[in-house]
Amino acid sequence: MNNSEPTLTKLEETLTAYLDGKLSPADAATFEAAHPEVAAERRQHEQLRAALAKEAPALSHGDFFNHQILREISPAPSPVKRAAFPLWRLAFGAAACMLAAAGIFFAFVGPQKSRSSDYYAQVLSVKAGDPDITAQLVEAGGVAVVWIDGLDALPSNYVLE
């Protein structure tokens, strides 16, 4: 018996001991009284045991025979499953993707050059929310300045952050 087989119940253990003749005569009589159908089973068991003992040939190479049976009932070793994406395929795929991305970038986007003269901002309107404050746009020499009047001066101990 190996660990994969379930353990026998108390009734199964007692029945096995009864059929094998390992119970004492008092225990066997008690078991037969509790289970009257086992007496017929024991007679059939004894007849089968006697027939096998008389008719079964002796095995001259029992170890070889057991080895052959073991090979027949043992499951065949399962083939080793290969990974669908081994490391070398993943590395090759990553390199191909990087090459394709670089090709698309240089073909369609290209490197961007910063042109400081192209920076342009335009002030469209200036409006102050407080009626005491006036704001106006002053343009001179290509430079636009927003001039704000009416703000209070900051105290000298004010710390700017």
Image (cartoon, helix red, strand yellow):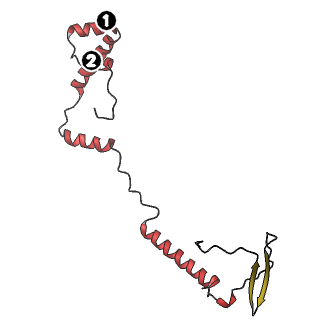
- For label 1, the SS is helix
Q: Which residue is mark 1?
A: 33
Q: Is residue 161 visible?
A: no
x, y percent for residue 112 = 62, 85
Residue at 32% from the left image edge and 15% from the top image edge: 41
Q: Is 135 in front, or is 24?
A: 135
Residue at 49% from the left image edge and 72% from the top image edge: 94
User: Can you tell which of label 2 and label 1 is closer to the viewer?
Assistant: 1
Can you name the residue that lies furthest to the bottom here?
Answer: 141
Place residue 148 in its image quadrant. bottom right
Q: Hey, what amino acid is under mark 1?
A: Ala
x, y percent for residue 38 = 33, 12
Which of the marked residues, 2 or 1, is nearer the chain's N terminus?
2
Q: Hey, what amino acid is under mark 2?
A: Leu
What separation in Å lies between label 2 and label 1 (alpha carbons)?
A: 15 Å
x, y percent for residue 69 = 28, 40
Place residue 120 in its image quadrant. bottom right
- Image quadrant holding the C terminus, namely bottom right
Residue 22 located left or right of residue 9:
left
Q: Is residue 132 visible?
A: yes
Q: Which residue is mark 2?
A: 19
